[in-house]
Amino acid sequence: MIKSVCGYCGVGCGVEYGGGKLSGNASYPINKGNLCLKGTSQLSSMGSLRLTTPLLRKNINDEFKTSSYKECISAIAQKIKQTPKEKIAFYLSGQLLSEDYYIANKLGKGFIGTNNVDTNSRTCMSSAVVGYKKSIGADFVPLRMDDIFSANLLILAGANTAESHVIFHNKIKKAKKEGLKVVVVDPRFTDTAKSADIYLPIKVGGDIDFFNLISKRLIEEELYEKEFVQKHINGFEALKNGLNSLKSEEMLKGCGLTYEQFEEFFLLYKESKNIITAWTMGLNQSVQGVDKNLSLINTHLLGGKIFKEGNGPLSLTGQPNAMGGREVGGLSTMLGVHLGFDDKSIKKVSEFWNTNNISNKAGLCATQMLEAEIEVLIICHTDPIYHLPNRNKNEALIQKIPLIVEINAYENSESAKFAHIRLPATPWGEKEGTQTNLDRTITKQCKLGKTFKDIKADWEIFMLLAQELGYKKEFDYKSPKEIFEEYQQMTKLNGYMDICDASYDELSHKPFVWGEKIKTFLTPAKVGNLFFVHNRLLSEKTTPDYPFLLLTGRTRDQWHSGTKSAQVASLLKYKELSFCEINPDDAKNLGIKEGDEVRVSSVRGELVTKALVVNSVAKGVLFIPISNRDINYLTNDLLDCESFQPDYNHSAVKVETLHKK
């Protein structure tokens, strides 16, 4: 029986494979044998729509010609040698394993000398990364999923766990039976909200007002932990003075709740000794994503509800190895192992990698690359044309890049039509390496078999490219284990990362949780930082021509663009790939009925889909799932000024019927 780990969401469930069947690993602590429908379906998607041969062309208007890894890698290396390092970029993915990330990061930042090494996690979790670093001192999740069994209250803010983190949601339901109270804060009445003790229908964009209101009440009613704040927290007076300048009535209006709704919630809040607040894209994907994170974390710092069992701010990552990528250094705003681009960190990493090529300037983020006149863009296991906002703009920009390389397991990406070189790579089930789930658990993903022969792993492709560039000695690896063990040694450069204590050979059956000894803040002074933030209303505003606000999100059985999941019949039964939820009052006013074909438009573009008339969205709000591949023709490209994460959940649109059902 082969033991491995799921390749879908950040929960990171253990799986086992034998006799041609895939099932949950009953001994794995995260899921104890349970799997969601996506998890159980992974064998079905392994061989479908696969990219199986290296392809090459000089112009995107030409047909691809069959090539070889050797010819393609030689062409890439030749172009890199001719290109200024600041014009070279790697666009990586949370689908990569940590060893893949490590080699790409080492090559780009350490030897080519470009810090333009970023990931699609930029669009998912970068606001949480910055929020954690500013408030507690490091990109560190200070609790784990099972802490909910020691909590009295779980607040889910902008997180639809019933559809996005199914096995964690099952844990929540079990904890509820043991006394946990759950509050869901979301503009939509989601499947998660249906099982909540209290549902708060927050106004789109009202998150900062909501969490500021909690902090203001904690201070005014002297419910905060005075001794804890005095000894362990900076910024209290600034936060207090800032909140004093805000009126509770205006914040209540800003978050769209009635006095009675908030008071019912706050009574439960005050009575709860142990509190966890969990969130994901609903907060992160915002032009004020970092501020939303800080306002949330403020409530835990004030209440002393952090670094204690059953307490803390729990960010929920979307992709299976978004956390591992952050640890390894797969963000352009960090060098590696949570080290930045300061002189001391550069010296440490330069000596470790034995290189003098590291730049001291942070690189381009994924959301900046297409506008930066890049000349070489290597895209690995992701699809920026599909997932970046303002797609019409991006389609025009990407055509200006002289060399686009796509490394992917599957042939049906939206970005493929703009690539000059396409290299097949092994997907989940055909590769080996490690990944870190959303609460710091490192597990080994193992090979279950080989659907197609002679297809290389991502780390091998980047290693071959490094060797072609002349770095044979520095990139001479025989296995993922060698890479992981080098990475483990690198983590020793950062005092709080104890990943070096893990055993690679044991990881498939004995996962390792790093950071368990960390019980205090990771700032230099070992104190937490409060920040006063306020709702600056920076998102796109509705107009008479575009009177609706568009929300986007994942549905239960689909994964992003559906590259894998849309090919599995069993995953198409629960919800369709494309629909638009609209409130009954809005539908009536516009003459739209259930099932009508509708056009949804913004100033940037349009799409056509099917109307679902539901009470789960408020008047003036629409919801379209991200499994609709055209979704980002609508979304705006406003970015948070610190995290550079897009504002996917606040786009002004209009909707009109095309054909009656």
Image (cartoon, grey):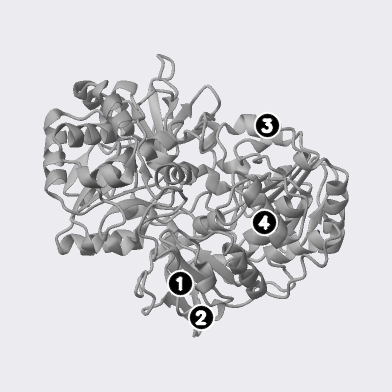
Q: Quadrant of residue 134?
A: top left
Where the C terminus falls, by quadrant? top left
**Looking at the image, is mark 4 or mark 1 nearer the viewer?**
4
- Whether residue 520 sits left or right of residue 65 in the image: it is left
Please state the horizontal and vertical placement of residue 305, each as a whole percent of the image. 26, 50
Give, as a three-letter code, the residue at label 3.
Answer: Glu
Given contact means CB atoms under 8 Å apart, are the residues at marks 1 and 2 in contact? Answer: yes
Which mark, residue 512? 1
User: Most extreme residue toward the top, as rendered?
Assistant: 544
The residue under the point 72% across, 68% down is 455
> Picture coordinates of residue 608 (x, y %)?
49, 34
Q: CA distance from mark 1 to mark 2?
A: 9 Å
Residue occupying the point 44% across, 48% down: 523
The secondary element bearing badge 3 is classed as helix
Q: Earlier in the sequence, mark 4 or mark 3?
A: 4
User: Label 4 to label 3, Cα distance in Å?
Assistant: 29 Å
**Residue 262 position in % (x across, y down):** 16, 34
Mark 1 and mark 3 in contact? Answer it, CB < 8 Å.
no
Above or below 239: residue 126: below
Viewer can see residue 526: yes
Q: Of the residues shown, which amino acid type is indicated by label 1?
A: Phe
Q: Residues within 10 Å of mark 4 (few under 14, many from 20)?
A: many
- Which residue matches tag 4? 349
Quickly name the residue at label 3: 371
CA–CA distance between discs 2 and 3? 44 Å
Residue displayed at 51% across by 55% down: 322
